[in-house]
Image: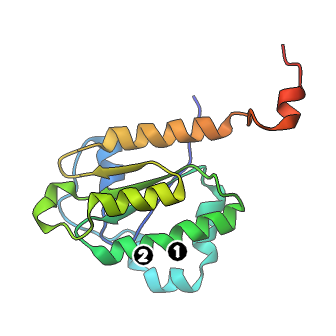
């Protein structure tokens, strides 16, 4: 069975762990218990090489913001820049995710803002809810599709098109 290395990035409290746990176990974590990276945020920001290492080893990236927190949407942009810098490649499998769609009445980031940013980046965009399990399975299925597609030889590459593979 093929192993996929997916890196989930976003500000603290946007639902990175909740989305992952919901996908893997089918349960929602009600109580917020910061994971080590969130808990040691200051140290990790100082040693950015730690995040660089996750990015270097990752094959696909889920960039999560909370749609009830405009600042978390702003925070996501330098994270994508970091992925491109570390990977040295624009076409890295990335999905932009607005999480907490179950809190529609508290929304601070419109769907159109998320969609516009995803179009600018040339990546898929989804709105999810770890709590109600909205689009969670679809999210992880899509990042796997993106990684599989990225692993295919580039049909526009003159080297590949001139090869006579049988």
9 to 43, vertically: above or below: above
Does residue 2 show up?
Answer: yes
| Residue drawn at x 19%, y 64% as measured from the top left | 31
| Residue drawn at x 18%, y 66% as measured from the top left | 107
What is the x, y in percent for residue 27? Answer: 23, 46
The quadrant holding residue 153 is top right
Q: Mark 1 and mark 2 in contact? Answer it, CB < 8 Å.
A: yes
What is the x, y in percent for residue 138? Answer: 35, 38
> The C terminus lies in which quarter of the figure?
top right
What is the x, y in percent for residue 45? Answer: 52, 82
Tell whether 71 sits left or right of 122: left
Disc 2 designates what residue?
75
Q: Nearer the viewer, residue 34 or 101?
A: 101
- For the view shown, which residue lies furthest in the top direction? 166
The quadrant holding residue 66 is bottom left
> Coloring scheme of the render?
rainbow
Mark 1 residue element: helix
Q: Which mark is drawn over residue 78?
A: 1
Q: Nearer the viewer, residue 113 or 166?
A: 113
Tell whether 143 sits left or right of 130: right
Mark 2 residue element: helix
| Residue drawn at x 45%, y 48% as measured from the top left | 124
Tell whether 52 sits left or right of 131: right
125 to 164, vertically: above or below: below
Q: Residues within 10 Å of mark 1 (few under 14, many from 20)?
A: few
What is the x, y in percent for residue 157? Answer: 81, 38
């Amino acid at each position: 069975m093929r192993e996929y290395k997916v890196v989930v990035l976003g500000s603290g409290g946007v639902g990175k762990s909740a989305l992952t746990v919901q996908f893997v176990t089918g349960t929602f974590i009600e109580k917020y218990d910061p994971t080590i990276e969130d808990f040691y945020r200051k140290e990790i920001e100082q040693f950015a090489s730690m995040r660089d290492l996750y990015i270097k080893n990752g094959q696909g990236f889920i960039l999560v913001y909370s749609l009830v927190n405009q600042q978390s949407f702003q925070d996501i942009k330098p994270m994508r820049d970091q992925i491109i810098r570390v990977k040295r490649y624009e076409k890295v499998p990335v999905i932009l995710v607005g999480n907490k769609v179950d809190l529609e009445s508290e929304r601070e980031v419109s769907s159109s803002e998320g969609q516009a940013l995803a179009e600018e980046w040339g990546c898929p965009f989804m709105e999810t809810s770890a709590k109600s399990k909205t689009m969670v399975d679809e999210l992880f299925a899509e990042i796997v599709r993106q990684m599989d597609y990225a692993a295919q030889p580039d049909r526009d590459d003159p080297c590949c098109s001139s090869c006579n593979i049988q």
